[in-house]
Image: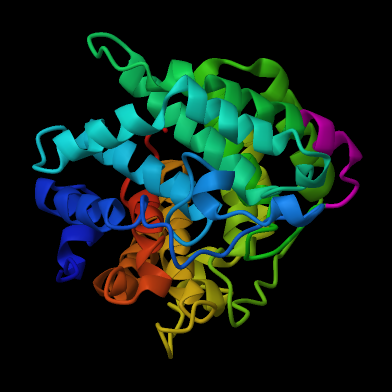
Amino acid sequence: MSSPSAPNATNGRVTRELASQFARIALGHVAREYPNKLDHVLDGPADARGPRDLHPIFFGSFDWHSCVHGYWLLATLLRLQPAIPEAPAIRALFDAAFTAEKVAGEVAYLARPSSRGFERPYGWGWLLKLQAELLAHDAPPSSAKWAKTHQPLADVFVARFEDFLPRATYPLRTGVHSSTAFAIALGQDYAKTVGNAALTALFTQKMRTWHLADRDAPAWEPSGDEFLSATLMTAACLQRLLPRDEFRAWFAAYLPRAAQRQPATLFTPATVSDRSDGKIAHLDGLNFSRAWCWRELAAGLPPGDPLAGVAEAAADQHMAASLPHISGDYMGEHWLASFALLALTAGEPIG
């Protein structure tokens, strides 16, 4: 399969052609069980089990969290472009995956004492992001019941955020799976969708405590295997949670020279030297996540702000650097299209 070309993505629209290409990529891996990198603690010999046995829904895509956001990708594409040729296959996949029995199996895995820290916090955020998108498909006139069936799993991860965040004294300012800002940003998309004011309040309180005093961010990034911008992700998360005027004042102090393209690291796409290396291939994801953040931040700027055009240009440049490489090697193919779609749908209220 050929990868889509950069011009389709930099206009910020998900065309039918692009949606079809992304859907074919995801359909090729969400039910592909192997190779697989498990996040699994063995308490005894009986726990030496395969991915499909441990995770009846999210056993594909190399790892659990990538499978979750592979489903989010497919659900979002189905909503945005419901007439793509892959739509019947997506619906059939979802009908088979989101059953009460399989959801119960995923919930039972999380009930193991050894699973307390499973996928914390990255997979937590992505699972709630998926549920927010599934809710759009359960709404009339659709007859789908995917979100209703899947809700018990979402409830588990809401409870985990509620249990963990009060005990989390410090944030994790990283560009990888441990990022608290990324997980909370996705979790807030869910909280807003369902109107969970208590969850929003918890997210807001933690992000205020952790980041409201941040000033003049040096943006020492990227490290060699990051797929998130720790600097921009903090801002994109706070943008979701703070009142607009308060956020704008904070952001002006956080990146005071952004309109002059400083720090320069935030405006320079990452170089990916070896896309067959799973860690180095993370840097394509960094380019997509920066594009996502820059577009969201630009949308929240006041009219006439000189940073808006700079941010949009940076987003386009980062997209162009990595979009041709979303397929071709499984180390990137099993997850990169999801991050490209985040950037393409930046600012959307659903999912």
Q: Is residue 163 magenta?
A: yes
Q: Nearer the viewer, residue 346 or 328?
A: 328
Question: For the point 15% across and 69% down, which residue is it?
Answer: 1
Given the current orientation, which residue lies at the most extreme bottom position? 273
Residue 292's x, y, as percent? 43, 54
Compared with residue 62, is residue 82 higher up or lower down, i.e. above or below? above
Q: Position of residue 84 (x, y in %)?
A: 11, 40
Residue 116 image-quadrant placement: top right
Q: How is the image coloured?
A: rainbow
Residue at 71% across / 48% down in the picture? 118
Q: Quadrant of residue 162?
A: top right
Query: From what the image shows, is residue 348 above or below residue 178?
Result: above
Q: Residue furthest front?
A: 45
- Image quarter where the C terminus lies is top left
> As rendered, which of 323 and 310 lies closer to the eye?
323
The prevailing secondary structure element of the residues shown in magenta is: helix
Left or right: where does residue 21 sit relative to residue 275?
left
Task: Specify start and end residues of the magenta stretch as a single range.
Answer: 162-170
